[in-house]
Amino acid sequence: HVARLRAEIGLTLDNVADKMTERGHSWRQSTAWKVEHGERVLRASEVTALAEVLDVSVFNLLNTPSDKARRASTYATDV
């Protein structure tokens, strides 16, 4: 979900890490990758900053679309 949000606005993992560091969180490219792949938990103190970086609401950052919604979205874009 985070990877899709990042890709939608054209950011690289390095861009995300730099922007998170600018907001006071010591992120590296590997940190962003681990968060995207579920290998690192997003800390509560990082949620708002990452939402800002990805230009989404906290709600949209934390709520992943259900499989049904993803299928409907894919269908809608294919039509």
Image (spheres, rainbow, N blue to C red):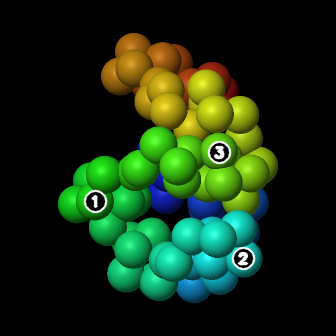
Q: Amino acid at mark 3?
A: Thr
Distance from the alpha carbon under mark 3 to that under mark 2: 13 Å
- List x then y, in percent, for residue 17: 57, 77
- List x then y, in percent, for residue 33: 38, 71
Name which residue lies at 63% across and 77% down. Answer: 21
Q: Amino acid at mark 1?
A: Arg
Residue 18 vs residue 17: left or right?
Answer: right
Q: Are marks 2 and 1 in contact (CB under 8 Å)?
A: no
The disc label shown at residue 22, or none: 2
The disc label shown at residue 48, or none: 3
Residue 73 vs residue 69: left or right?
Answer: right
Residue 10 vs residue 5: left or right?
Answer: right
Q: Earlier in the sequence, mark 3 or mark 1?
A: 1
Query: In terms of secondary structure, where does tag 1 sit?
Result: loop
Q: Which residue is mark 1?
A: 40
Q: Earlier in the sequence, mark 3 or mark 2?
A: 2
Q: Amino acid at mark 2?
A: Glu
Q: From the viewer's side, name the closer residue of 72 and 78.
A: 72
